[in-house]
Image (cartoon, rainbow, N blue to C red):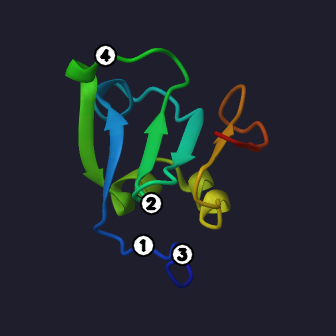
Amino acid sequence: MKAWPFEDPENVATLTVGKIVKWGAAILMVCHDAEDGSWQFLTGEPSDMEDAMLVALKEIVARDSSVIELADLPLGWCASRKHPGAPWERHLS
């Protein structure tokens, strides 16, 4: 990988779910929160708070490097895709 593409540092905490980290589910939705600039990497399915996890941004990139395409996702925007390998579609959250 070339230079780190995100404005946030590699070790910034991001919100994700155990389905992604523990079970290898695909990241199909990414949100960049308008209020605090936090990142969320989700499956696109409803999740329980019990499944929520905090992981470093670099761990997400290592798991799915296609999220690098979203490094410039503006605050308050989300991106989703139908399946891994499908193009990311950006939209206001």
| Residue contact between numbered discs 4 and 2, judged by CB atoms under 8 Å | no
Gap in angstroms between the C-alphas marked 4 and 2: 22 Å
Q: Residue at x 55, y 24 (%)?
A: 44
Amino acid under label 3? Met
Q: Secondary structure at mark 4?
A: loop
Q: Residue at x 65, y 34 (%)?
A: 84
Q: Secondary structure at mark 1?
A: loop
Please give the label number shown on residue 48. 4
Amino acid under label 4? Asp
* Residue sitting at the far front: 35
Gap in angstroms between the C-alphas marked 1 and 4: 26 Å
- Is 26 on the left or on the right of 74, as rendered? left
Amino acid under label 2? Gly
Query: Which residue bears the numbered disc 1?
Result: 8
Tell me where residue 91 appears, x and y as whole percent: 74, 42
Marks 3 and 2: which is nearer the front?
2
| Residue contact between numbered discs 1 and 2, judged by CB atoms under 8 Å | yes
Mark toward the start of the polypeptide (3 vs 2) = 3
Query: Which residue bears the numbered disc 3?
Result: 1
Query: Which residue bears the numbered disc 2?
Result: 37
> For the residue carrying disc 4, how many other residues have a C-alpha within 10 Å: few (<14), some (14-19), or many (20+)?
few
